Image: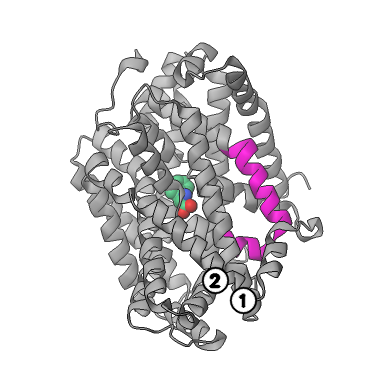
Amino acid sequence: MAEITKSQHSEWSSRFAFILAATGSAVGLGNIWKFPYITGENGGGAFVLVYLLCIVAIGIPIMIAETMLGRRGRQSPINTMSILADEAKANKNWHTVGWMGIITGFLILSYYSVIAGWVLSYVFKALTGSFSGGNGETISALFTDLMASPVQQIFWHTLFLGATMLIVARGVQGGLEKSVRFLIPTIFVLLVLLVGYAMTTGYYQQGLDFLFKPDFSQIDSDAVLVAMGHAFFTLGLGMGAMMVYGSYLPQHVSIAKTTLIIAGADTVIALLAGLAIFPLVFANGLEVSAGPGLIFQSLPLAFGNMTGGWLFGLLFFVLLFFAALSSSISLIEPAVAFLVENKKIKRTTACIVMGLMTWILGVIVALSFNVWSDVTFFGQGIFDLLDYITANLMLPIGGLCIAIFAGWIMKSKDSAHELAMEKPQFYALWKFLISYIAPFAVIIVLLKGVGVLG
Ligand code: TRP
């Protein structure tokens, strides 16, 4: 029976190890790089509110469902979905959800690695004191120069992806677990200090207002779609990453409780990043809608002008690099786990194959910021398009399938057994959210966002 099978890969050593790894997967560029810039592009408070709503009503129930399916199936997402479909006497084709997830993860990693490469290059800029005494112009120039250079971007992308594949090749316990232990607490402390600095700029209140005073005239159905897509992205949902991590989870651990801790930590870190960045943006007359360069153009201004900023900036980008690393491993782990299980190839070989494919697509993304910056599809550049399709369409669709499976296909007695919640009301609440609220909301937002519902 599924509930007694163990994963063939290995298990987390404890509940704490799982929390670390899953928080590592959740907290990453999404929180510190993406959340502020899409908040800036979508007008602030109202967008933030919708994003928070999506985390609570859609993200958390689906995160519980995805982890639960993974632990019950105990295999890579493709095989897990087949096993669980069997168990529920449902159509075998549910394993397509696993396939789609693997493809989504690979697509996301290709651009994730390029952005993480930018972070790495900023580690070196910090090291060599490039931020020191900088003003809006000099700091922006650093970023523009990086964007213009395919060689630099490809170099850093290669380093980052190499590091990711090395960790994944070493396997769950050797690699994934150890890399997160000090990371999250330290990032948290650094962000709190940065928020402290932001308070000294005289623009703190303006930043606060921008983030938390909702003005609904600022958002339309596309912004709502972006907010929902980001809820999936930031929690690492909808492509089987949590399913794989769940499959390594010991049986006695409470999934719902751990999920709440992880989602809470993820949200707090994103909001802190926003609180640190927007006052700087206003204080230095930068554009809130600057796009993907926002943190690279704002944070170094703080580092360049505060006492001890050299060390602080260095520390910050090093930590952001590690946060990105602990996320990127979860993007590719489902694909690697699948190749190991079904193609009977070694973990190392699987990593080389996936690494090479991701590297090539990443190079294309890096070129889209310069040489191919005028290549557009549907009015969007290569990077924007990839990001839009994966985060705003593929992850929500994956999440929708997971919600439908957990809410409607899987037998209630099985999900209740697997979740083993303390109170029946908690199970009933989850079951209601996953069967009705989450799928309904995802469908409406998707259809409205792409314009089908007008
Ligand atoms: N959540 C990570 C971030 O915020 C990115 C990430 C890791 C992810 N694993 C994922 C996104 C799986 C979608 C699906 O940076």
Q: Is residue 172 above or below residue 204?
A: above
Give left or right: position of 181 versus 378. Answer: left
Label 2: which residue? 197
Label 1: which residue? 201
Q: Amino acid at mark 2?
A: Tyr
Q: Position of residue 134 (x, y in %)?
A: 49, 86
**Ligand 1 is within 8 Å of the C-beta of the residue at disc 2:** no
Secondary structure that dominates the magenta span: helix
Residue occupying image coordinates x 52% and y 82%: 140
Q: Secondary structure at mark 2?
A: helix
Q: Are marks 1 and 2 in contact (CB under 8 Å)?
A: yes
* Viewer-closest of 199 and 240: 199
Q: Position of residue 132 (x, y in %)?
A: 43, 85
- Give me the disc on residue 96: none
Q: Is residue 73 magenta?
A: no
Residue 437 seen:
yes
Residue occupying image coordinates x 41% and y 73%: 313
Give left or right: position of 57 versus 190. Answer: right
Quarter of the image containing the N terminus?
top left
Q: Secondary structure at mark 1?
A: loop
- Which quarter of the picture shows residue 212? bottom right
At label 1, counting other C-alpha atoms closer than 10 Å, the crowd grade (few under 14, some 14-19, many 20 or more) is some
Q: Is residue 374 above or below residue 14?
A: below
Give left or right: position of 263 versus 151. Answer: right
- Which quarter of the picture shows residue 264? top right
- Magenta range is 35-59
Q: Amino acid at mark 1?
A: Thr
Distance between mark 1 and mark 2 Cα atoms = 7 Å
